[in-house]
Image (tube, rainbow, N blue to C red):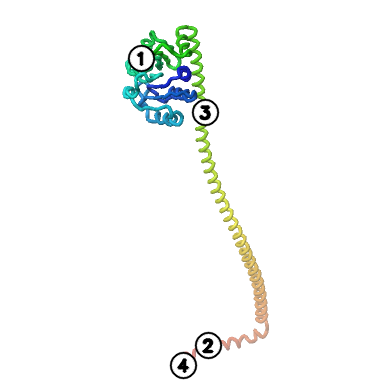
Amino acid sequence: MFWLIDALRPLRFVELGTHAGVSYCAACQAIELLGLHCSSYAIDTWKGDEHAGFYDEEVYSNLAAYHAPKYAAFSSLVRSTFDAAVDHFEDASIDLLHIDGLHTYDAVRHDFETWRPKLTQNAIVLFHDTNVRERDFGVSRLWSEVSAGRPHFEFLHGYGLGVLGIGDSYPKAIEALFAAGDQDDAREAVRTAFAHLGQAVARRGDTAYALRQAEAQFAFSREEWQREIEQRGIEIATLETEREQVTAQAREREAQFALDREEWQRQVEGRDNEIVRSQALASALEAKLTQSELAAQELKDSTSWRITGPLRTLSMNIRWLLRNVRRAGG
């Protein structure tokens, strides 16, 4: 696509069926970098079909977001069916037409015939999927019909791409391409060269995509790690605060325990002193008791105690008699 834009230098380029916009953006990139005065139009409903599959709005929104800041100065994304859009173009105004819509024979033939009046005298038409022969694809059949007797070249890689010349006068580079299509060795050399170039671009694109995916994953993982680190930091700060609180409580308890221990020690010492004093007092009392008992025994054993025994008995009897008399008189 890039080579063809450079070789043909079209003034108007139209693509029927753009999907994600790979081929269309390649053309826009060439137009921009080469500084060409070329208006470009991508026409698609961006809803899909039975061959491309049906898809959601994200396909269009992604393309529009990429396309607008880069190519909006000369390019437009037209959301329309092919038939509804054709009347918006004047006849003989399109230099390069890429047909890549529904790929049944009837559909692609209809697209070609409908847009044929809009082509300039020496326009070029690209037919995608000329090398697909399955699922009711009919581009290869139409290609065989329209390429007969006209200048053309067919690439076989990437599902096949037919390059068809409508007129008979083209720049030398394009004339050389068409001439190579009539020579076996030259045709294979051109096909091989462009296939290798395409593979290199595809690999570079895959690598870039993989790199973006890896970067996105790394960014996501980094954010996850950062959140995890922040969470761990919060947890650590909380634990440190709790540790400080526990340490302070332990110190308070140790200080209180020291005070309590001193108080208990004083109380124990006080009790010990009381016990010692009580033991000393008990020993003294025991000694006095022993002395009293000894004195009493000595008194009992003495002669005077025995002599006064009858008097003590008489005294007791008199006191008993007097108490009885007083009771009787009362």
Q: Tell me the crowding category of disc 4: few under 14, some 14 to 19, or many 20 or more residues within 10 angstroms, Cα based.
A: few
Closer to us: 172 or 258: 172
Q: Tell me the crowding category of disc 1: few under 14, some 14 to 19, or many 20 or more residues within 10 angstroms, Cα based.
A: many
What number is the disc on residue 322?
none
Percent across and percent down for residue 50 are 34, 21
Q: Look at 49% across and 15% down and name the residue there.
A: 194
Closer to us: 238 or 20: 20
Q: Tell me the crowding category of disc 3: few under 14, some 14 to 19, or many 20 or more residues within 10 angstroms, Cα based.
A: few
Which mark's residue is nearer the viewer, 2 or 1?
1
Q: Which residue is mark 2?
A: 320
Marks 3 and 2: in contact by CB < 8 Å? no
Which mark's residue is nearer the viewer, 3 or 4?
3
Q: Tell me the crowding category of disc 2: few under 14, some 14 to 19, or many 20 or more residues within 10 angstroms, Cα based.
A: few
Q: Which residue is mark 3?
A: 211
Vertical relation: 217 (above or below) 173: below
Which residue type carries mark 2?
A: Trp
Vertical relation: 169 (above or below) 79: above
Q: Earlier in the sequence, mark 4 or mark 1?
A: 1
Q: Secondary structure at mark 1?
A: loop
Q: Which residue is mark 1?
A: 138
Q: Look at 49% across and 91% down and name the residue there.
A: 326
> Label 2, label 3: how many angstroms apart (C-alpha)?
132 Å
Q: Earlier in the sequence, mark 3 or mark 1?
A: 1
> Label 3, label 1: how many angstroms apart (C-alpha)?
37 Å
Marks 1 and 3: in contact by CB < 8 Å? no
Percent across and percent down for residue 75 are 42, 27
Marks 2 and 4: in contact by CB < 8 Å? no
Which residue type carries mark 1?
A: Gly
Q: Which residue is mark 4?
A: 329
